[in-house]
Image: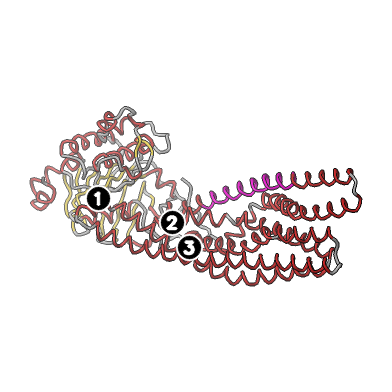
Amino acid sequence: MTTPDTRRPRPASDILRTALRRNRGAMIWGTVLMGLYQAGETAFPIALGLIVEHTMRDRSLGSLGLSIAALAVIITTVSLSWRFGMRILQKANTTEAHRWRVKVAGCGLQPVARDVDLKSGEILTIATEDADQTADIIEVVPLLISSLVAVIVAAVALGLADIRLGLLVIVGTAAIMSVLSVLSKRIGSSTREQQARVARAGAKVADLITGLRPLHGFGGNHAAFRSYRKVSTEAKLQAVTVAKVNGAYAGTALALNAVLAGAVTLTAGWLAFDGQINIGELVMAVGLAQFIMEPLRLFSEMPKYVMIARASAERMALVLTAPPVTTPGSQHPAAGGNLEIDCVRYGTLRDLKFTVAAGEFVAIAAYQPRAAADLAVVLAANVPRDAYEGAVRVGGQELGELSVEAVRAHMLVNPYDGEIFAGTLRTNIDPSGTSRTVPEAVEASMLTDVVALHRDGLDYGVRDRGANLSGGQRQRLSLARALAADSEILVLHDPTTAVDAVTEQLIARNVAKLRRGRTTVVITSSPALLDVADRVLVLDDGVVTAEDTHRNLLADDADYCLAVAR
């Protein structure tokens, strides 16, 4: 795992400039090839006009053959330049979108939280749709330049026939772009709002899927559905608004382009009728009036895509420019594996103080679930260092002074609601494919019955969030993953709440056996896990109020007996 990038990231304009700068080679070649394509497209009616003129004047088979060969060269140039130009640009576009997806996802997955008011569903939308739309700038700029080339070639060719035709194209194009630039700003603002609403709807879906089982449990699924329908309807209405604006933009662009083409055609016809241009120049002008519609359409649509790319870049900047809540240190803990909590105050924790020696198995019985959650989140380094008082030391080194790599290599905190990913049982247990203790972890977590149920064994397919597994199977799979990591310090938070008492008893014994000689902390109220621990710390009202073995506490402490006895 790499250390999070703590440098000040870039705003939206810098994101676009960065994308353009690191793809300038592909964009140069793409621009050249697409310029050839547009020039070839525009040269086609020019060549037709010249063919008509020379054929009517010379009336020779040689001139006709030469003209056909020239048309063949133009057609070949148009075909090959489009093929290879778009291949280069689309490859660069796809690669750049991948880079930004990875960067945004990296910010979202950093163990150190970032001070940004975005939920995971919104970050997912930004890392996919917004990254793709931002990378579209790689194609937009070359297409814009190549379309401009086509317009300039057409204007020059028409200007050589008659200066008024060339000026008509130039003035008309400038007028069209002026009108459309106003509409493109409206598209940009509407698109930003749509992206925000779609992201909120995505975040709502992610939250609902995560909490679907408890929602069904207490009958809150209908209220949750109404809540989602509200945000989804808002996203739909905004999408309709964006579609209307895009439709108005496209319709206006098409109408203006048609007016310009019609004006060029009528002007050329009038000039030919008046004898100021010949038949070949008339054919060329009428052909250019038709062919110029396509580059004009592309040229007029580019500002819209630029605004969409900028809006997406601004969405990405929300994540990338958010300053890290805390900056990881660079130290490494000493070997040994001891864990020390020194007068920690955070949430419900009040001057919490205890030490777990290297190789010790300690259970923490928290009377208040909130206190257990607060302790787990502090140990997992998921809160900034200045958000709590006191100190957490790992291997004699304060947690805030350790690098992210050092913390993750030395200590693993496995949450009670560990995520299950789409893949197989094996890839969920050992995502990196480097663990040497997968069989032992499977056996210790009592996942063996799940493996035995399926012909594929550990290669049995698991759906996203473990949808094809029961709650107990998901919990045991998460526990197997934590055990397979074989870290020096392992912190487990309620690892057996979804399994039956017999299985829980077997898991407790197996975990104690597998983790013998390794530092293990279990935050739990399970009698089975409490019984196999070397000692039990009672966490009540944010402080340690008692410390002994499980059986001694059962015999001497009535409150403890009432809290954990089942």
Q: Earlier in the sequence, mark 3 or mark 2?
A: 2
User: The residue under label 3 is which amino acid type?
Assistant: Leu
Image point (36%, 48%), residue name = 394
- Image coords of residue 226 (percent x, y): 29, 62
- Image coords of residue 204 (percent x, y): 35, 58
- Label 2 element class: helix
Tell me if mark 1 has few (under 14), some (14-19) or many (20+) residues whose alpha carbon lies within 10 angstroms of its own.
Answer: few
How far is the residue under mark 2 from the one under mark 1?
24 Å
Look at mark 2 in the image and give the residue it sits on: 123
Eye-nearest disc, 1 or 3: 1
- Image coords of residue 117 (percent x, y): 40, 63
- Label 3 element class: helix
| 528 left or right, relative to 399 | left
| 266 left or right, relative to 476 | right
Image point (65%, 55%), residue name = 21
Which span is picked out in magenta? 76-100
Name the image quarter holding residue 220.
Answer: bottom left
